[in-house]
Image (cartoon, helix red, strand yellow):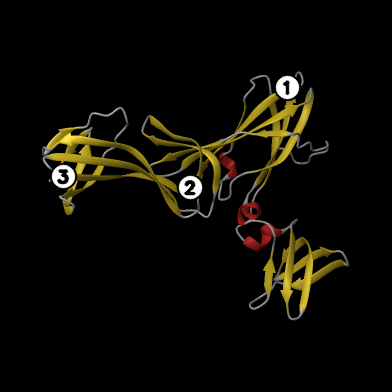
Amino acid sequence: MLKKISAIILFLFSFSFADSLIVNKKGSSTYIQYSQFLLAQGETIIGPIQLLPMVNTDDLVIKPSDSNIKISGYMIEPTKENFIENLIGKTISIEGDGRLIRGTVISVKDNFITLDTKNGVVVTTLPTFPNRLSSSLKWQDIQAPRVTIKLNSDKPVSAGINLIYPINGFSWDVVYTADISNNKVVLNGFYKIVNSTPIRLNDVALYLKENGRVVKLYDKTVIEPYTSKLVNIDRLELPYSKVNTINSKKYFPDGKVAVYKNNVFVGYGSIQNNMLKLP
């Protein structure tokens, strides 16, 4: 780990590529954050690079795309459990009691906050209702840990850097319906991706993982906070039978099936090992 960075930090011109989210059905999912940098010959320090919030930075893996790029070390700027402490180094406004103070937070201690304002250093109490503390930054920008990386290269090169880490709060399931009419069964299947976090993901490549199988859903998509995103698996028309084989090139995970007969709900069936079982 770098205790101190004495070189000039170069956040070199970077090219934005799609990040990837690999969602597990349960437990931690995997986030792969990708950026490409123009590296000089010798030592280059890139950063700070903002990670997603709610991440354990001890589990971070850094992988350059070029095997000739060596990682000398890196420095983590973690987030604090106390939301207010994450404002240190950021510009905020405190409004109330007929006053408005705007400045960069120097410290937060013992219910006091110290600001560097254009009129000098100001120490004041942390605001309480109805006073207001505000920032132009988004929640993700305030809560996100950051990493600065020291790299070595034998020659100038354009290299991709993958930052890989587990992330909680994402999961997936399946939603199936079967409609029986005219001696046929219409089966509809959807992957249900659940985001139970306040994190918004933009232009992310989305995958599902179950055991050793990985299914790619999107090259680029948006996942909103606190939402469930449903993605169609397939729509099949099958001859009516209590047990029917699912013939599809798509992956149909095991799950329960809501069954309707002539548009009336009649109970639940199931899909197990690519077999549709109806009540």
Residue 16 in the image: state x and y as whole percent: 64, 35
Mark 2, residue position: 168
The amino acid at mark 1 is Val
Cβ atoms at labels 2 and 1 below 8 Å apart: no
**Label at residue 253:** none
Mark 3, residue position: 180
Mark 1, residue position: 157
Toward the bottom, the furthest residue is 97
- Residue at image coords 74%, 34%: 13
- Tag in front: 3 or 2: 3
Cβ atoms at labels 3 and 2 below 8 Å apart: no
Residue 78 in the image: state x and y as whole percent: 65, 49
The amino acid at mark 3 is Ile
Task: Give the vertical position of 98 relative to 247 (above or below).
Answer: below
- Residue at image coords 46%, 41%: 29
State which quadrant residue 173 falls in.
top left
Could you say which is closer to the camera, residue 144 or residue 248?
248
Toward the front, the furthest residue is 182
Q: Quadrant of the N terminus?
A: top right
- Residue at image coords 56%, 44%: 202
Could you say which is closer to the camera, residue 147 or residue 17?
17
